[in-house]
Amino acid sequence: MQRTRIKFCGLTRPADIEAAVRLGVDAIGLVFAPGSPRRVDLATAAALRQRIPGLCHCVALVMDQPYDTVQAIVQTVRPDMLQFHGSESAADCARFGLPYIKALGLGGEAETAVQAFPNALILTDSHAPGQAGGTGQTFDWNRVADWTRQRPVMLAGGLHADNVESAIATARPYAVDVSSGVESAPGIKSIDRMQAFVRAVQRADQSNH
Ligand SMILES: O=C(O)c1ccccc1N[C@@H]1O[C@H](COP(=O)(O)O)[C@@H](O)[C@H]1O
């Protein structure tokens, strides 16, 4: 049975990371995007990173930030991969020598943009170009069903325990990513919501494969 991978994004507290790891998620995202309520500074991120064990990926999320800023994150936090959530080009993303996730907002010309990132794990989100993610908004999952047949795609945007089964059944993504849908307040994850989300993904996998 193929398992849908799970990434939880925007964790800010050690206890939330420990809970996510116990739930068996595949990746944990630390947000460095300016203006995000989930943004962590370098020192906090380095401490949080220590709580993420080797078989769970640590993802550093950045958005249109200068090379030196991203390089400092890479050097200090040592993430396993980067997530680019802005208007970065493939060359911008490749400069750090790490595997990367590229977010494409379905509010724009994502259908053509996807071709420009052959080496990325593509993440589909509901944000329009130039806008931040983490908005809790969904989009029509049918729009990415073609892509997921051709390459691994991470589905994001407004997912939560009550809609992720339907999202997986419709789009059949390689992975799902959630931020606000497992929170009790921005940046504060809810253990109950994280657990409900993981269980919903497991149910979807059991009924879809
Ligand atoms: O989580 C954030 O604060 C954030 C800020 C800036 C860019 C992206 C951000 N999060 C990513 O947005 C999507 C959707 O999040 P949500 O589940 O709808 O809240 C997801 O990929 C997060 O990683």
Image: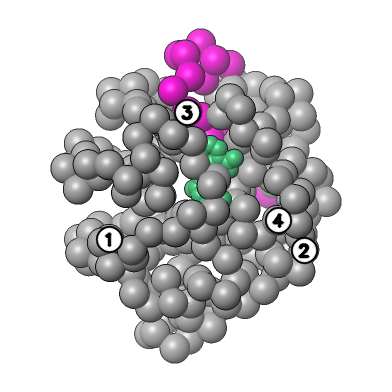
- Residue depicted at 41% across the width and 50% down the height: 125
Q: Which image quadrant for residue 190? A: bottom right
Spatial CA distance of label 3 from label 4 is 21 Å
Closest to the observer, 34 or 7: 34
On the image, the x and y values in percent for residue 62 come to 51, 29
Where is mark 2, residue-wise? 191
Q: Mark 2 or mark 1: name the one nearer the start of the chain.
A: 1
Of labels 4 and 2, the one closer to you: 4
Residue 112 lies within the magenta run: no
Q: Mark 3 or mark 2: name the one nearer the start of the chain.
A: 3
Q: Is residue 188 left or right of residue 148?
A: right
Spatial CA distance of label 4 from label 1 is 26 Å
Q: Is residue 33 left or right of residue 91?
A: right
Q: Mark 3 or mark 4: name the one nearer the start of the chain.
A: 3
Where is mark 1, residue-wise? 144
Residue 36, can we see it?
yes
Q: Mark 4 or mark 1: name the one nearer the start of the chain.
A: 1
Q: Residue furthest top?
A: 68
Q: Is residue 96 left or right of residue 184?
A: left
Q: Which mark is residue 195?
A: none
Where is mark 4, residue-wise? 183
Which segment did they paint magenta?
A: 53-72
